[in-house]
Amino acid sequence: MASSEETTGRVIATNRKARHEYFVLDTVEAGLVLTGTEIKSIRQGNVNLTDAYAALKNGEAWLLGMHVSPYEHGSYANVDPRRERKLLLHKREIRKLASRLGETGVTLIPLQIHFSKRVAKLLLGICRGKRAYDKREDIAKREAERDIRRHYAR
């Protein structure tokens, strides 16, 4: 499991809501099983990660709730925009994820989709939910930093 969030390729979509709603404990990069029209649509940036999450079922990792808009030049090959998509991970990575997800309050949230050597990759975060006061602290910190930048920018 990678602790850094460096991506090698072009970032297509990020889940900004995830950073606000969850503490990111660790990250994992996974491949996606996609159809031809889905990958073309993702290359155009027609993907939304806002309500997406990942789950483990029968020893496999699945991405649920990600919306990929139908490819505009596709025809019968277009699939359901919210279908379940299989994630490509090594067996040992899935075992590690299963042990981490056994803890209470921990879930898998997609943080971003990017391309690495022409292949779409998904950066998954092992996350724990924030409480309301944690969110308020983050907002206050962000506003303080913004005020400091404004003051020194003059």
Image (cartoon, rainbow, N blue to C red):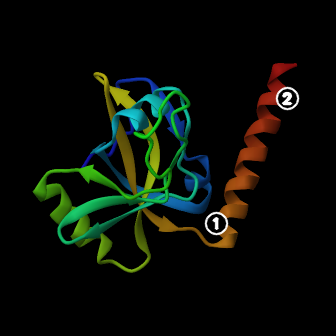
Which numbered tag is attached to residue 72?
none
Q: Determine which quarter of the picture holds residue 102.
A: bottom left
Disc 1 residue type? Asp
Outermost residue toward the top? 154
**x then y, percent, for residue 14:** 53, 40
**x then y, percent, for residue 2:** 28, 45
Mark 1 or mark 2, whichever is nearer to me: 1
Is 115 positioned to the left or the right of 14 in the image? left
Q: Is residue 22 visible?
A: yes
Is 147 positioned to the left or the right of 139 in the image? right
Outermost residue toward the front? 76
Query: How far is mark 1 from mark 2, CA to CA?
Result: 26 Å
What residue does disc 1 label?
134
Q: In this rendered view, identify the residue nearer to me: 59 or 26.
A: 59
Q: Quadrant of the C terminus?
A: top right
- Specify few, some or many for label 1: CA neighbours under 10 Å numbering under 14, 14-19, or 20 or more: some
Which numbered tag is attached to residue 151?
2
**At numbered mark 2, what does the secondary structure look like: helix, strand or loop?**
helix
Is 16 positioned to the left or the right of 120 in the image? right
Residue under the point 50% across and 50% down: 81
Q: In this rendered view, identify the residue nearer to me: 42 or 148.
A: 42
**At numbered mark 1, what does the secondary structure look like: helix, strand or loop?**
helix
Disc 2 residue type? His
Q: Which of marks 1 and 2 is nearer the N terminus?
A: 1
